[in-house]
Amino acid sequence: MAQRVRDRIDGVGSTVALAIPADPAYVATVRYFAATIARHEGLPEELTDDLRLAVSEACAEAIDAGVTGSIRVALSLEPQEIDVEVTSGSSQAPSEPHGLEGMVPIYRLQLIRALFPDAETDQGHEVRVVRFTVPHASSSGA
Amino acid sequence: MDLVLGSRNEHGWAVLEVQGEVDLYTSSQLRDAILRLTEEDENRIVVDLYNVSFMDSSGLGVLVAGLKRVRERGGELALVFGEGSVQKVFGITGLDKIFPTHRSVGEATGGA
């Protein structure tokens, strides 16, 4: 079934990818996408929750930064891990925080690193990337 | 997907019940609900997150700001959540040490 999902969504080898507009309304779609793939790959529920949170934060971080265009979330399915890459275009003016949340800073990348310590970011002039690895082996008790 | 929000008074506390997923898109609804309560001079607020299935740092930011706002007025903002992903995100960030947290609304309001 996992193979069918891969073929349906991307059709390219073992990488499953989804692109969404840089719009907060679409971030939930990324969470459902990531959770579906994680469950098909047999990740335990707690790790699936962590993946869901991390991809959601990565997309939200790009939107906070004022990225326009699309955000691409790619999950490369390896025997021992899932490599996650969230890629977006260059950022324009950051969106203005308002109301209550403007009173406190939000640390999205730190939260991703707390969940997946190998998380790294590449915030170049043209492209912003957040990468991290989900250790798949834990699902088999290894 | 919208949040489902409802408020009531219980044992001298304003209880804000939240259902759904709190993220960048929906956190403004939570923000507006907390602001509305504070504007109504509610200084003892319980935010019931028991039926929240997902929360990211957008939601945390709104809650921390709400806590600051009510404490500046001499009040308190307490949280209710069960075990699971919401509890974990508060644990990872250490915010479970900042907020009064409870397992039920009754426990939070002293009505249990």
Image: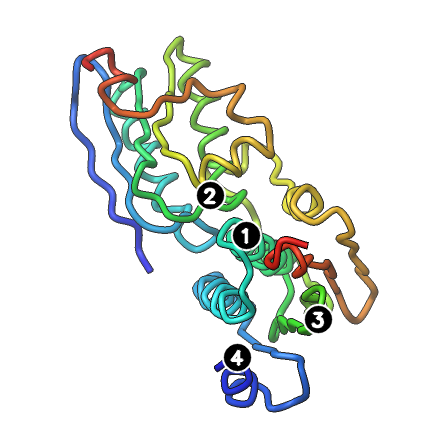
Residue at mark 3: A79
Callout in the foreground (1, 4):
4
Instruction: Sort mark 2 into few (<14), some (14-19) or many (20+) by Cα contacts within 10 Å.
Output: many
Between the residue at mark 2 and the residue at mark 3, the CA separation in whole angstroms equals 26 Å
Residue at mark 4: A2
Between the residue at mark 1 and the residue at mark 3, the CA separation in whole angstroms equals 22 Å
Between the residue at mark 2 and the residue at mark 4, the CA separation in whole angstroms equals 25 Å
Q: Is residue A51 left or right of residue A84?
A: left
Q: Is residue A20 visible?
A: yes
Residues at discs 1 and 4 both on one chain:
yes
Look at the numbered discs 2 and 1 and tell me whether their residues touch, using CB distance below 8 Å: yes
Residue at mark 1: A53
Q: Secondary structure at mark 4?
A: helix
Question: Measured from the top left, where is residue B42 in percent x and y?
Answer: 27, 19
Between the residue at mark 3 and the residue at mark 4, the CA separation in whole angstroms equals 13 Å
Instruction: Pick the residue in front: A89 or B54.
Output: B54
